[in-house]
Amino acid sequence: MADASSQTAHIQACLDRLSGGDEAARAELLGCACERLRNLARKMLRGFPKVHRWEQTDDVLQNAALRLHRTLQQLPVATSAISSAWPP
């Protein structure tokens, strides 16, 4: 896995491309996020065995990826930095 600073730089470059109208950057951003989202979903479900009985890691990942894709379509994102106003 790439170090955090190069990964952040890559994500920022994708966001810049997306802001410039490059629609392929959205797919690239989703690709960058998917492994992290999968790990977070796995960790989350591990803490809730009753939920894990009904939901699989990939189900949670798909839902999160769809939400991220929709958000990237609806909101202009200028930076990879986390806003102090998050969550809204």
Image (cartoon, grey):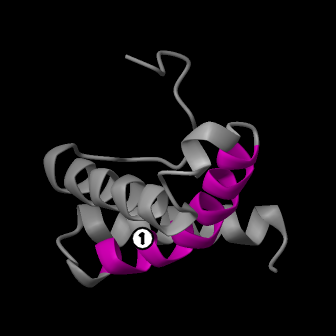
Q: Could you tell whether 37 is left or right of 21 in the image?
A: right
Query: Which quadrant is home to the C terminus?
Result: top left
What x and y, as percent, mark residue 38? 60, 64
> Disc 1 on helix, strand or loop?
helix
Residue 32 position, x and y percent, is 55, 73
Answer whether residue 20 is magenta in the image. no
Look at the magenta stretch and give its main secondary structure.
helix
Q: Residue at x 58, y 59 (%)?
A: 37
Relative image position of residue 46 (x, y in whole percent): 75, 48
Residue found at x 39% / y 62%: 15
State the residue in front, 55 or 3: 55
Q: How many marks?
A: 1
Q: Tell me where residue 79 appears, x and y as whole percent.
A: 47, 47
Where 27 falls versus 19 (above or below)? below
Write the residue at 65% across / 47% down.
45
Q: Residue at x 78, y 62 (%)?
A: 5
Q: Is residue 29 magenta?
A: yes
Q: Is residue 33 above or below residue 28?
A: above
Label 1: few (<14), some (14–19) or many (≥20) C-alpha neighbours in 10 Å: some
The answer to whether 73 appears left or right of 84 in the picture is left
Quadrant occupied by the N terminus = bottom right
Q: Which residues are magenta?
A: 25-46
> Viewer-proximal residue, 68 or 20?
68
Answer with the quarter of the image where residue 26 lies. bottom left
| Image vertical order of residue 86 relative to residue 79, above or below | above
Say left or right for 48 vs 1. Answer: left
Identify the amino acid type marked 1.
Leu
Left or right of residue 70: residue 61: right
Residue at the spot of label 1: 30
Where residue 39 sits, quadrant-wise, is: bottom right
